[in-house]
């Protein structure tokens, strides 16, 4: 038996009865109102007196205000039934009584559910706070191409060049399927160079990339850039219901972000004659003091796949290569 179909029929009875007209019901001796649906199913409302139709709105509103709870109870009660003979809903003294008659294992079964109807209907929360965690892979584009394509000295390894972000924000559902996220976060760009002997040097006028000539066993070479960020992300939500900050199972969003650099450093690790050495130098290396860009996400449950592209360059104008950072990966909002 399809429980969702039965629940839909119950809802159809409740909602259809609010818009009765002479063309959809017949007055009979037994004071019944018969309504046919598009698929020729028949719904019946039994009343004591046709004058009671004037009071139907109030009774139906009481039921509609408690539909969520009625549906939850129906899902539980109908579980295991093979078929349903009748479902009736009565509103008596601020109490909804749902009587179900069905067949389970070839035996007739009667179930009665009591629900208080004097409470105010539950409203969907429209403003949520959330925690943001993000992990993505970094690279950058130079005039629309990856430096790796030309084996440039400053080419990076996407696997190992991580973008990490931690933060939080507020989500406002200003329309039922549409929300907007406003979030703040701390993030770290880690650009791990594909050539482990790569050295980054700051001169008086620019940044220079070169290859070390010591002949050491090179372990790692990277540049790290931290930012504090602010982002705005409109989103559309769809699919089955979900709990918490994500009202629906699926979401799509596209927005903008901006950030201010908090520092930066380069780090080289190498080994000579069995002795491991680490060189780490903090400095601005003519790194841009700000970043801004565009970002898109696709989410399911609390997980999001994201892609971000900096419209600003990694280095200040005329101080380094025109590199636009790009990252993609997973983030979590909960």
Image (spheres, rainbow, N blue to C red):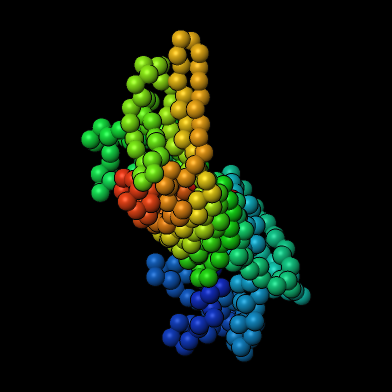
What percent of the width, then of the height, locates residue 214? 37, 18
Tell me the quarter of the picture where residue 140 sits: top left
Q: Is residue 82 visible?
A: no
What percent of the width, then of the height, locates residue 33? 53, 79
8 or 185, nearer to the observer: 185
Tally of marks = 0
Tell me the quarter of the picture where residue 294 sits: bottom left
Query: Does 148 sit left or right of 84 as displayed?
Result: left
74 or 229, nearer to the observer: 229
What percent of the width, then of the height, locates residue 245? 58, 56
What residue occupies the far front of the structure in this picture?
204
The residue at the point 36 percent across, 55 percent down is 311
Q: Is residue 147 visible?
A: yes
What residue occupies the far right of the structure in this picture?
93
Give the vertical position of 61 relative to 259 (above or below). Answer: below
Give the vertical position of 270 relative to 88 (above or below). Answer: above
The residue at the point 50 percent across, 83 percent down is 20
The residue at the point 55 percent across, 58 percent down is 183
Give the vertical position of 20 relative to 43 (above or below). Answer: below
What residue occupies the far top of the structure in this picture?
273
Query: Does 156 sit left or right of 31 as displayed?
Result: left
Query: Does 157 sit left or right of 100 as displayed?
Result: left
305 or 117, nearer to the observer: 305
Give the vertical position of 152 relative to 212 (above or below). Answer: below
What percent of the width, then of the height, locates residue 86? 58, 62
The residue at the point 50 percent across, 17 percent down is 276
303 or 54, nearer to the observer: 303
Tell me the quarter of the picture where residue 110 sits: bottom right
């Amino acid at each position: 038996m399809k429980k969702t179909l039965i629940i839909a029929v119950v809802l159809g009875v409740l909602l259809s009865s609010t818009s009765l007209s002479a063309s959809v019901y017949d007055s009979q001796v037994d004071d019944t109102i018969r309504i046919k649906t598009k698929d020729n199913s028949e719904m019946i409302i039994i009343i004591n007196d046709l004058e009671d139709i004037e009071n139907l709105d109030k009774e139906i509103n009481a039921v509609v205000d408690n539909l969520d709870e009625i549906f939850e109870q129906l899902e539980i009660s109908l579980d295991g039934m093979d078929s349903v003979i009748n479902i009736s809903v009565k509103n008596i003294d601020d109490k909804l009584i749902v009587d179900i008659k069905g067949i389970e294992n070839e035996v007739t079964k009667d179930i009665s559910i009591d629900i208080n109807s004097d409470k105010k209907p539950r409203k969907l929360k429209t403003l949520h706070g959330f925690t943001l965690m993000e992990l993505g892979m970094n690279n950058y584009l130079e005039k629309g191409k990856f430096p790796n394509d030309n084996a440039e000295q400053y080419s990076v390894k996407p696997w190992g060049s991580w973008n990490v972000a931690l933060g939080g924000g507020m989500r406002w559902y200003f329309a039922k399927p549409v929300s907007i996220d406003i979030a703040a976060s701390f993030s770290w760009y880690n650009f791990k160079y594909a050539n482990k002997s790569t050295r980054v040097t700051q001169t008086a006028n620019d940044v220079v990339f070169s290859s070390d000539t010591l002949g050491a066993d090179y372990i790692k070479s990277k540049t790290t850039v931290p930012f504090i960020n602010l982002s705005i992300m409109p989103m559309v939500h769809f699919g089955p219901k979900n709990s918490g900050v994500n009202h629906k199972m699926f979401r799509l969003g596209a927005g903008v972000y901006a950030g201010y650099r908090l520092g930066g450093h380069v780090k080289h690790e190498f080994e000579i004659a069995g002795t491991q050495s680490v060189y780490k130098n903090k400095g601005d290396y003519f790194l841009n003091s700000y970043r801004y860009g565009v970002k898109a996400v696709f989410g399911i449950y609390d997980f999001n796949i994201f892609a971000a592209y900096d419209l600003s360059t990694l280095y200040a104008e005329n101080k380094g290569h025109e590199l636009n950072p790009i990252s993609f990966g997973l983030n979590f909002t909960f």
